[in-house]
Every structure is written in structure tokens, then in C-alpha cells.
Amino acid sequence: MKENIIQVIKLVLVCIVAASVLAVVYSVTKEPIEKAKAEEKIKAVRAVISGYEDGMTMKTDTVTDSNDNQFVIYTVIDNQNNVIGRSIASYSDEGYGGTVNIMIGMDSDYTVTGLYVLSHKETPGLGSKMDTDEFKSQFIGLSDTDADISVRKDGGDIDAITSATITSRAVCRAIDTGLKIVREYMPFENHDSEMSEDSIEAEVEDVIEE
Amino acid sequence: MSLKNNFLKGIWNNNPVLILLLGFCPVLAVSTTVIDALGMGISTTFVLLGSNIVISLIRGFVPKKMRIPVFIVVIATFVTIVDLVLYGFFFELHKSLGLFIPLIVVNCIVLGRAEAFASKNSLLDSIVDALGMGVGFILAIVVLAAIREILGNGTIMGLTLFPQSYQPVIVAILPPGAFITLGFMLAGMNRINIGREQREKARKKALKAMKNTKQSNKE
């Protein structure tokens, strides 16, 4: 009996030590991890929007679609208040190994300007080929209205990755969804009107000051 | 057992994958490309080293009946530390390895060495054992990955080996290909070891015969 109690106490001790070590490591790495995640996002936006230069501002919006899914949309604006491009962190849950997260860059015609794979759990060596230029370059210049963003097997315009059709489908779906979400919830036309309202206000203020 | 033999046994005579048949889960899953296999091998070796050190240090403290839960807590703690540290400070590496790190928890090599070696041996011996086993694991998984990558994808370390007309044997890179290739590797390993044993036996027999004839000559 006494022996049993000692065993339990020892196991509890080991767990307490392990938990405290983990707590320390977690608190030490928490900040770098968040920083790395944020840097990754910026790197992704930079990679997918053609014409992104240092000194441009990046606006972040979160939209919620009709199915309660949240998407983060980044708008890159240059010094003259022109929208250079917009990118959306889109995803599809229908990958072979789970969720596929992709940053999609587009210009004001809703044409894809670049793709950046944020994270995926696809099979290494097969589905993971979605992150190659050979596959990604197929999407550049396509828009959801004048092309069918789906794999050829489903009647679309995209060559699937050999023996990774499910992954290819998920990528297509993520891109198609991303373009449609931006078109529906954050259209480029809106920005211009917002801007003009802003500038009107600014002018009014100017007048008052005078 | 000398330190050198202790180290070398992990590489050949007691190779964790090919002789002890441990850790098949990551070996089969993460051997589609050589780069991934190397990453998996190195992170496993690191966890193995950490867990062997800690378990060897606390081996007097751990009650016999409670040892398995204690080992699992130690291993899981190490894996989580590796995951967090890589995520925070080596983000690029984590991006490619992140998929495999949780797999190390279920790698029975780590638990197997904790149970069979580190819990019974000194710190230095346990460190050497972890390094030997780690190198043995890396060798096995990298060789398997090299065969699969060359056959199934026509590349090695991302370099294309064959002209465009080469049709890769896709099955090699698919899950069944892992089992088939590993089966051939095990067969090859057994063939070499059995051959060695037979030669050893034949040599001993010859020696004995020689001794006998010498003795009879003397008589």
C-alpha cells in the first residue's frame, strides 16, 4: 500500500516537472512564434501581389461569409492611395490530409497574380508538389469568371498533379473560393468609393480649417 | 561492451529499423524524399538523445511499475519542446518538418531504447547508444527514401536524374511502395547477415579441423 502511494507521488512529481518545463518553453517561444507567423503572412502577401514595394501600406480586413467561415483579406495600397492588389488567405478542408491554406494574390480584375502555400498536410512527395512553381504557375493570370478553376478530370482548365488529384482539387477549390469571397465581400469597386468619401471628408475639414 | 561497439551496434547488428524492426510508422510515412527523411532522422535522433539522457539520469528515481508512463511523459515533453523551439526560432525548418514532429512521439525506437537501454545503463553509455541508434535510423530511412525517390520520381535530393522520357515507377512513392521496398531491404539485410554467420561457422569448423589434425600429427 505504502509502495503504491510512493509510486503515485513520484509519477505526479515527474508530471509537475514536465509541465513546468513546458510552461517555461512555451512562454519563451510564444512571442517568436507569433512574430514568425506574422512575418510569414507579410512575406506571403509580398510574394503574391505583383508590384508590391517597400513603403506601401497593408490594410487587413476580416470578412465572414454566409457559412460563418472567416477569411482575412489584405489590401496593398501605394502612396497615392491606389489599390495595388488584394490578397486573401483562403483554404479548403478537402485536401488529402486535411486543410490546405493558400494565400492568393489578385489584381483589380480578380485575376490571380500569385500563390503562396501557407500550410498543408498533404502526402510528402505527392500532394506536397502543390507547392512547386510548375503546378502553381498554371493559375497565374486566371480569373474565376473567364476560366474554370478545376482539374481537367472535372472538366476544368488545370492539370492535376500526378497521383494527387484530391490535393489538386482542394487547391482549385481554395482559389475559386478566395476569388469569389473577395468579389462578393470586398470588391475593388468599394475601395474607390470609400476613398472618395474619405477624400471628401478631408476636403471638408480643409474648408473648415480655412 | 566498449563504447565503440555500443555505438556501432546501432548502425548494423542492432539497427533499430532493419534488425529490431522498430519505428516503422515514420519510416514508411516519411521516406518519399531524401530531404524529408533526413529531417525526420535528425529530429528523431535529437529526441532520442534527450530522452535517453533524462531517463538514464532519473533511472534510480523511477519506480519499476510506473516506468512506462514516466518514459512517455519525458518523451512527449521533449517532442513538444523540439516543436515549439523549431517553430519559434527556425521557422523555415519547422515549415518542412512540422508535419513529422508529432510522429516522433509514436516512434517506438525512442520508447524502446528508454526501456531496453537507458533505464539500465549509465549516462555516457546511454548517450552513445542514442547516437548509434540515431545514426542507424537515419541510414535506414535515408536509403529507403533514396530508393523510393529515384524509382518513383526520377530525382535525388531534388535533382533530376533521368531524361524527360523516363516514366517514374509511381508505385514506389505511394504507400505500398514503402512496404515493398522495405521488404526488399530487410531481405537483403538478412541475406548478408546469414551469409556472414555461415562463413563464421565454416571458419570455426576449419579451425577445429586444423587443430585436430595438428594434435593427431603430434601423437
Image (tube, helix red, strand yellow):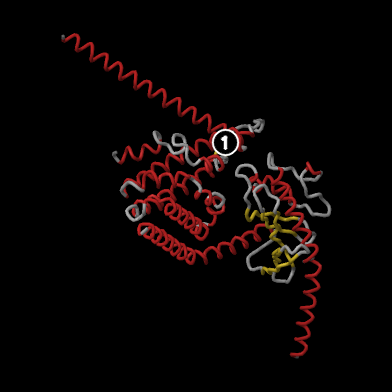
Percent coordinates x, y for residue B77 in the rendering: 46, 57
Q: Quadrant of the N terminus of chain B?
A: top left
Residue under the point 75% across and 60% down: A107
Residue B2's place in the image compared with A4, above or below, is: above
Residue at the extreme left of the image, as rendered? B219
| Lateral position of residue A117 relative to residue B43, left or right | right
Residue at the extreme right of the image, as rendered? A146
Residue B213's place in the image compared with B67, above or below, is: above
| Lateral position of residue B3 relative to residue B135, left or right | left
Badge 1 marks a residue whose secondary structure is helix
Q: Amino acid at mark 1?
A: Ala
Frontmost residue, A139 versus B203: B203
Residue under the point 40% across and 45% down: B113
Residue A75's place in the image compared with A126, above or below, is: below
* Residue labelled with disc 1: B178
Q: Chain of mark 1?
A: B
Q: Residues within 10 Å of mark 1 (few under 14, many from 20)?
A: many
Percent coordinates x, y for residue A100 in the rendering: 67, 53
Residue B151's place in the image compared with A183, above or below, is: above
